Image: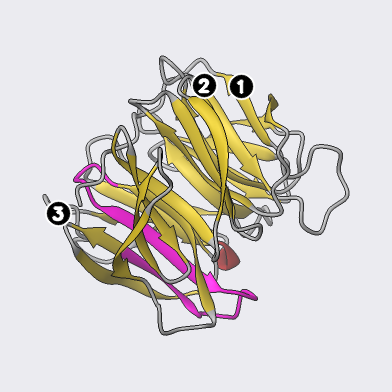
Amino acid sequence: MQVFSDALCALGEGPLWHPERKQLFWFDILGKRMFSKGDSGGGGWQFEEQYSAAGWVDRNTLLMASATGFWRFDIATAKQERIADLEADNPVTRSNDGRADPQGGFWIGTMGLQAEAYAGAIYRYYRGEVRQLFDRITISNSICFAPDGRNAYFTDTHSRRIQKVALDAEGWPDGDPEVFLDLRTEELNPDGSVVDATGNLWNAQWGASRVACYSPQGQFLRAIDVPASQTTCPAFGGSDLSTMFVTSAAEGVHEDEAGMTFFARMDVKGQAEHRVIL
């Protein structure tokens, strides 16, 4: 892993490779900022509240999730338009990990500002509708999807278990979640995840300075070291989707590269991030 951007994030999160712009977007939740870097240029945006994740709608538009809502964001003008609320009446919570699903929806998790026990939930935005999928979540993370769109993954980091749930044809959960990966014995903290083109799940493990890879059956395959202990989320990108990007967090640690965003060329390819249908 090498440094992709030395912009320091107190809590880096939500890396998104825009497949049309060939550009990475990511957030510093606590700093209320979004950054970008890539073939279409780079930049930074400052917001009035905490934003944490985004999906792409078209070349010039993102769907972004904040502490209070879902927003249509024009990349060129920075114009924002609220399109739906997200726990807007709950001052205790904010958004956290999120990702677009293969059916055009967008999943987003919430959590307490101080990681209050069971204060968060996981929601799905789909064609104008916002529906709560799972509740009693302490730290929502690891939202990602199998290449065939038939399964979703998520975790409550506090539980140290990544869950797997079947999806129906429209991308809604079909049945109860089951444990995909139990990391309690190893005392590992699952943070953000992404699934590659072959179905392997790559999980950033907070406090462990690594991103670990697991087969679709939950078998550990390998791990990649990251030069920051508080890794938060991986994403695949680059011209051929074989570059892995990893965000990290600087808050609470004294490390030279904590809070920076990293990259590495890989011998596997990721999925192109799915388009959100508003």
Tell me whether the residue at label 2 lies in contact with that at label 1, contact meaning CB atoms closer than 8 angstroms.
Answer: yes
Task: Find residue 174 and report its horizontal and vertical position in percent.
Answer: 19, 61
- Answer with mark 3 or mark 2, whichever residue precedes in sequence: 3
Q: Secondary structure at mark 1?
A: strand
Tell me whether the residue at label 3 lies in contact with that at label 2, contact meaning CB atoms closer than 8 angstroms.
Answer: no
Evaluate whether residue 180 shows in this view: no
Q: CA distance from mark 2 to mark 1?
A: 6 Å
Res. 243 mark: 2
Compared with residue 123, is residue 253 higher up or lower down, i.e. above or below?
Answer: above
Q: List the residue tagged with mark 1.
A: 264
In magenta stretch: residue 210: no
Res. 168 mark: 3
Q: Is residue 234 left or right of residue 16?
A: right
Compared with residue 261, is residue 134 higher up or lower down, i.e. above or below?
Answer: below
Magenta range is 101-123
Q: Nearer the viewer, residue 111 or 72?
A: 72
* Quarter occupied by the N terminus: top right
Q: Nearer the viewer, mark 3 or mark 2?
A: 2
Task: Find residue 7 and report its horizontal and vertical position in percent.
Answer: 70, 38
Q: Secondary structure at mark 3?
A: loop
**Residue at image x 56%, y 35%?**
43
Q: Is residue 71 left or right of residue 119?
A: left
State how many labels appear. Answer: 3
How packed is label 2: few (under 14 Cα within 10 Å), some, or many (20 or more)?
some
